[in-house]
Image: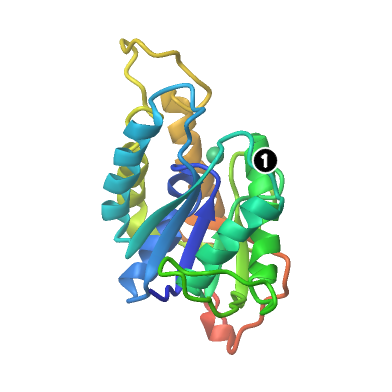
Amino acid sequence: MKLDILAIAAHPDDVELACAGTLMVHAAQGMKVGVLDLTRGELGTRGSAEIREVEAATSAKVMGLAVRDNLGLADGFFRNERPEQMLLIAAIRKYRPGIVLANAFVDRHPDHGRAAQLISDCCFLSGLRKIETLDEDGKPQEAWRPPQVFHFLQDSFTHPDFVVDISEVIERKKEAIKCFKTQFLAPAADNEPKTYISSPAFFESVISRDQTMGKMVGVAYAEGFTTVKMLGVKSFKDLIGNVT
Ligand SMILES: [Zn+2]
């Protein structure tokens, strides 16, 4: 299955917090959009890998994804080394995405930065035909280099290189985040330990960040991205705001 956009992230729920709106906006435009979670989030303080799998599948429906896959790497311990790279290269070649959305290079959780570099490196390596990988039927895969790789903002604030207007889908983004019932907006009375991300204040901070980025470009809500490669536009008309 060829995807127009594939978001790749360290943990199930990274995508919901950082770029769910962008995925939904493009899915609504008819693009084929998918998510590849690198780990099952099995080290998360609250919930379990099994529960998070159900939460991720529920959220995938809310986001209108064509596919949500999991690479099964070790939460907290995966490395940017050959065994992990070969698995990820095979996944990139399977979905042949035009655009890859990836974790932030610098962030609070050390998995995020490692994932960012792993994804960035594999998007390049995947284009080298002499790296041989096999598909699920044992057939050799063709090389594929995604033309664009963008990194979404996560917990740490980085000045984005561009933002995507998600005003139309902000309520559905909230719904997608809330699918992770074990992780966010924890009821005060539940038995599990409270964490940095389980408080209402954390949830509000995610939405108010989107509001701040929206305000910077004159829309209600937006999600921010950085890019290593320089971006070009065919027309200034593609920019938000009155330019002519
Ligand atoms: Zn994460």
Outermost residue toward the front in this view: 138
User: Residue at image x 59%, y 89%?
Assistant: 234
Residue depicted at 32% across the width and 31% down the height: 181
At 56% across and 38% down in the image, what residue appears?
A: 74
- Left or right of residue 106: residue 29: left
Identify the residue under disc 1. Answer: 107
Residue 157: x and y in percent read 66, 44
Position of residue 84 in the picture relative to residue 223 (left or right): right
Asked if residue 73 is positioned above or below residue 185 in the image, the reply reads: below
The answer to whether mark 1 is within 8 Å of ligand 1 is: yes
Helix, strand or loop under label 1: loop
**Front-most of residues 169 and 138:** 138
Q: Residue at x 44, y 75 (%)?
A: 4
Vertical side of 178 occupied by 25: above or below? below
Tell me the quarter of the image containing the N terminus: bottom left
Nearer to me, 172 or 131: 131
Position in image of residue 103 (x %, y %): 60, 51
Identity, as a three-letter code, of the amino acid under mark 1: Asp
Q: Is residue 240 visible?
A: no
Relative to 104, is 195 on the left or the right?
left
Find residue 223 and report its horizontal and vertical position in percent: 52, 56
Q: Residue 14: x and y, percent?
A: 50, 44
